[in-house]
Image: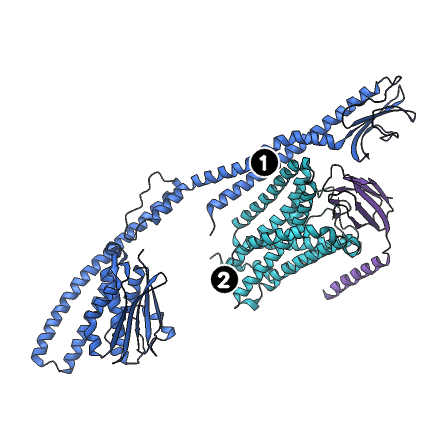
Amino acid sequence: MKNYIATILMSLSLLFVSSLASAAAVEIELVIKDHLFFPAEVEVPAGQKVKLRIINQDPTPEEFESYELNREKVIAGNRQTVIFIGPLSPGEYPFFGEFYPKTAQGKVIAK
Amino acid sequence: MRSIRLFLVASILATLTLFNFVAALQGYQSSMEEAEALFDRQLEDLAAIVLNIDVSGEVEGISLGNGILFQIWQSSELLAASSGSPAESILEFEEGFSFVNFDSYRWRGFTQFNPSSQRWVMVVERTDLRFILAENVVLESVLPILLGIPLVGLLIWSIVSLGLRPLDKLSTELKKKQAHDLSPVVYENSARELEQVIQSTNSFILRLDEVLEREKRFSADAAHELRTPISALKIQLHNLGEEIGSDHESFQQLQSGVERMQHLIEQLLSLYRTTPEKFAQNCHQVDLYQLVQEQIAQLYSSFENRNQILELSGDEALIEGDDFALQTLVSNLLSNANKYTPEGGKILVSVCEIDSDIVLSVEDSGPGIAEEDRLRIFDRFYRSDLGGNSNREMPGCGLGLTIVAHIAELHQARVVVEGSNFESGSAFRVKFRKKK
Amino acid sequence: MFINSVILLLQEILEAALLISVLLVITNLFHDIWGRSFVLRKTWIFYALILGCAGAWLYALVTPTVSEWFDYVGQEVVNSLIHLVSLGFLILLSWVAPSNYFSDKTSQRAQLVIASMVVIVLLALVREGSEILLYLGGVTSQSENVVPVLSGAVIGAGIGLSCGVILYYGLTSLSHTWAFRVCLLLLAFVCGNIASQIVMLLTQADWLPYTAIAWDTAGLLPENSITGRLLYALIGYEATPSILQAVCYGLAMLIIIFGPLFRLAWPGILAKNVEQ
């Protein structure tokens, strides 16, 4: 039992270190304006970590949410924030603004 | 304590709210989908109309209404467009429905290609406008459900209250029953669910009544049957004393034995005499101070015999109570103090008002009662071993304080035993409720 | 706007309402195990609600500032810290409160239990409530949104609270033993959910490494379906959790399952003590 736990801890710490090593991430900017995402379709490289900088130019807060990316974050009005996503396998990952989902819609396309 | 009313109201209201709101939500969603489909069909129709516009003449400045734009393209040349539409193509050159963001709005678009004229028609409509339009219509049907919920809650509350009324009535019926009232619970038109409860309660009351009746008869019989032989015994004892002389040792022991027996019987009878039923009948206004004064006067000789100094302080103090019972209580406390205080000791009796209580205290300078004994002294036939063997010689049967506690309970008074303000000794305090 | 408001309020309130229901039932049960010697009242919930609403309001006020900390991942860090504290108090409740240390200090045990419950609910309300306040505050600044948003909020909150009430009465209608068992299982799921949330937040902030997706049940049961949301609030269901999330979820559940409180429930101490 003890050995087993030690193995798990070892592998977890290895994972952690390896991720720190590959910390340099691609940065992509996403703007929220009039409850719309610009660009509505974000192209990112597949298999690589991506730093998504979201700039909210509306005075109202918005919540970036994506079930496919497993991400959720509130962005206050006229502020910006950062979300790390990926590495993603190639495909489409829709996201939306949970506060204004009728208009604020977009998708990440990993290629 | 769990409340049936709260449970019923909360759980029914929660279930109703849940189902109503989910139904409203479902209704909203299907209505909105319906509306979307309707708007899409309109967009399609619009595209068909726009396709047939004659573009040979002047077509600038055509407006299709608020938030709707169109473009007609022919081999990447803009043939015609509504006023306000951008110069580049608003949609992809691909047939069907799509969404697009421009001009700080999100648009629903429809593109159609006419192979005969080689024309592309693109029609877009602002999603926010059509959404608000649809939502306002649909919300009209949702709002009544929402506003109805408080009303439903109120209704459920009253219905549940109405349903619980038989139970409420039964419990008030039982509550207002006096202690001496052993008549069966009469409850016309009760609920079927309560029938068993009422039946069982009534059969308990009936059995209780029988038991009490038997007890009453027993104590009356016992009083008669026990007193008569003792009186006879005392007369014979008196005669015997005349004949053999009263200083004979066996005679004296016999005499004190008979006296103890008489005392025991009197005490036993007074314990039975003060039953709750009797108490309720005899209850009236009593001046406790005056009553204490009278009892002291009656017992004065025994205090004098032992050279005890007795002090009484206080003022008129009115309480609700039974004269006879209170006399017994006071005289028991006084004779206890008399018995357990040594010759020349001090006894302090006071009747005073403390907060909203009338407190009768009897303090003595006797040996006192140990902490661990203080609860047991009220038990029947318990006698403190304090004072060693000498206590056994005290006349008494161990019922005095039991009777005090019993009478106090009938008066809803509390008896407290503490150390006295003297150097040694105990203080008995009986806290009565003040008469309102 | 109506439907968004329903979904948002439902999601946040359902989670808090279910947690509160479970803790209230546990208060009742604690009262039955230990409460013969001290009074465990359910009034703690009022303190928790008042403090929680005040906390949510404060946190909503400072969210814009907080989110800029640590190079724009302050929100994730602070939220996972809040989660971590909740986890700590859940451990306190399941490991320390039932310990023999308190056997002759029952009033301290009561204080510990009540303090843990207040803190757990308070923090849940701060988390969920601040999001609701941010949303309502932002959206209702446009007057045409007020009616649909508020009516949606009432419907969402109504459904969430109703589920809480139904769960509460459902659990109290069970026998003491089974109510205790179900409550502790739900509490174990709450622990798992919190742990998986911490991992998700810290991965999002790039403080924890990315791990591959453990499984994908989005096709089977999407997270945004009604059932999915209910399961999320009840047991922290996620359609596509990462491996690290799943592992931490399991580990956190073990905290409760191996705790002394769970052992109290499983051999059925209540069966002996209460249901005589």
Residue C251 image position (x, y, % from top left): 70, 58
User: Residue C109 lies in what quarter of the image?
Assistant: bottom right
Residue C14 image position (x, y, % from top left): 63, 46
User: Residue B185 lies in what quarter of the image?
Assistant: top left
Q: Which mark is drawn over residue B146?
A: 1
Q: How far apart are marks 2 and 1 (CA)?
A: 43 Å
For the point 20% across and 75% down, which residue is it? B302
Task: Give the chain of mark 2.
Answer: C
Circle 2 or circle 1, nearest the eye: 1
Residue A47 visible here: no
Q: Which residue was labeled with disc 2? A: C38
Q: Which amino acid does label 1 sit on?
A: Leu
Q: Compared with residue C170, is residue B377 higher up or lower down, i.e. above or below?
A: below
Q: Quadrant of the N terminus of chain C?
A: top right
Colour representing chain A = purple
For the point 17% across and 65% down, which residue is it? B226
- Of all residues, the one furthest to the bottom in this rendering is B248
Q: Compared with residue C138, is residue B250 higher up or lower down, i.e. above or below?
A: below
Is there CB contact under 8 Å for labels 2 and 1? no
Marks 2 & 1 on one chain: no
Q: Which amino acid does label 2 sit on?
A: Phe
**Chain in cyan in the render:** C
For the point 57% across and 55% down, which residue is it? C47
